[in-house]
Image: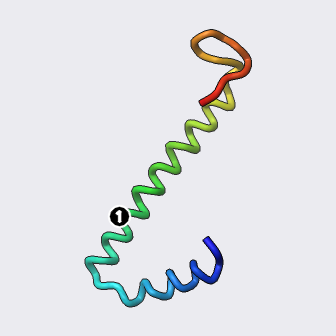
Amino acid sequence: MKQKDFKRLTEMLGNLSPTQLRNVSQRVDELNGKREVQDLTDKRVASLAGCALCGHPEFAR
């Protein structure tokens, strides 16, 4: 996202109703949870010496 678009987005947050803010907050929490899982998965995959099924040193997620 471009910096000017992000700035405009954050400025608009002050105009949201409490319900809208709650919805935005819940969505951000969902995305953060997905990011945490992705980070853990990336660390696990990086620690593997090869494919868990066949042992080949190169594999795709």
Q: Residue 25: x, y in percent?
A: 38, 69
Quarter-wise, where is residue 26 in the image? bottom left
Establish if 31 lies above or below 11: above
Assess disc 1: are there few (<14), some (14-19) or many (≥20) residues with their C-alpha within 10 Å of its C-alpha: few
Establish if 30 lies above or below 3: above
Report the number of numbered marks: 1
* Scheme of image coloration: rainbow
Quarter-wise, where is residue 60 in the image? top right
* Residue type beneath disc 1: Gln
Horizontal relation, residue 48 to residue 27: left or right: right
Q: Residue at x 38, y 90 (%)?
A: 15
Q: Residue 32: x, y in percent?
A: 48, 56
Q: Quadrant of the C terminus?
A: top right
Q: Which residue is mark 1?
A: 26
Horizontal relation, residue 5 to residue 46: left or right: left
Q: Residue at x 37, y 71 (%)?
A: 24
Horizontal relation, residue 18 to residue 52: left or right: left
Please, which residue is most extreme toward the left here? 19
Horizontal relation, residue 27 to residue 45: left or right: left
Q: Residue at x 71, y 20 (%)?
A: 49
Quarter-wise, where is residue 41 in the image? top right
Q: Residue 37: x, y in percent?
A: 50, 43
Q: Residue 33: x, y in percent?
A: 45, 51
Q: Residue at x 43, y 64 (%)?
A: 28
Q: Quadrant of the N terminus?
A: bottom right
Please, which residue is most extreme toward the right here? 57
Q: Secondary structure at mark 1?
A: helix
Establish if 61 lies above or below 12: above
